[in-house]
Amino acid sequence: MNLDQLQNKLLRAARGTSSSDAVPYAFEQRIMHRLTSRQPESAAALWGSALWRGALACVALTMICGVWSYASRPAPADTAANFSQDFQATVFASMNQPGEGDW
């Protein structure tokens, strides 16, 4: 339906009814101004708003996962013994791998 036809139908229907004291002053002019001043949004604006909402949801999910992983970490054991074993395993890791001459 054409917007001009719709506007004319609404105006005819509004003029056909009797006015009441419950309707505020200049209500019709304010509504018509709001309807005519509203511009349709572009596709880029729609995509942009959806992407910003998605980004906020991702940030919230990242924060929740970070708190969860921090809260569920194991209790620290003897870190000096673990460090020395990890350091030794790292240093000697290249020696434990088969070389080209072992074929």
Image (tube, rainbow, N blue to C red):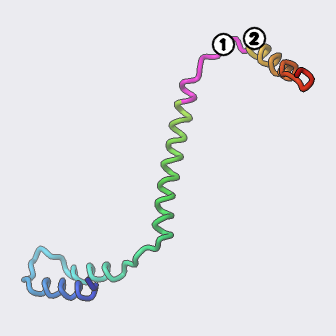
Answer with left or right where residue 57 lies relative to residue 80: left
Q: Main secondary structure of the magenta part?
A: loop
Q: Which residues are magenta?
A: 69-79
The amino acid on which the numbered mark 1 sits, given as a three-letter code, is: Ala
Q: Residue at x 46, y 59 (%)?
A: 50
Question: What residue would you read off at disc 1?
Answer: 77
**Quick check: 71 above or below 65?**
above
Q: How many marks?
A: 2
| Residue closest to the eye, 50 or 31 | 50
Which quadrant holds the C terminus?
top right
Give the farthest residue toward the front.
103
Secondary structure of the residue carrying numbered label 1: loop
**Quick check: 28 above or below 90?**
below
Q: Residues within 10 Å of mark 1 (few under 14, many from 20)?
A: few
Q: CA distance from mark 2 to mark 1?
A: 9 Å
Evaluate if marks 2 and 1 touch, with contact meaning CB atoms under 8 Å apart: yes
Residue 38 falls within the magenta-colored stretch: no
How far from the left and from the top, in percent, is residue 75? 60, 16
Residue 75 falls within the magenta-colored stretch: yes
Q: Residue at x 47, y 71 (%)?
A: 43
Q: Residue at x 22, y 82 (%)?
A: 28
Question: What residue would you read off at disc 2?
Answer: 81
The amino acid on which the numbered mark 2 sits, given as a three-letter code, is: Ala
Q: Residue at x 37, y 78 (%)?
A: 38
Give the farthest residue toward the left.
18
Secondary structure of the residue carrying numbered label 2: helix
Which quadrant holds the N terminus?
bottom left
Answer with left or right where residue 53 lies relative to residue 6: right
How far from the left and from the top, in percent, is residue 39? 40, 78
How far from the left and from the top, in percent, is residue 79? 72, 15
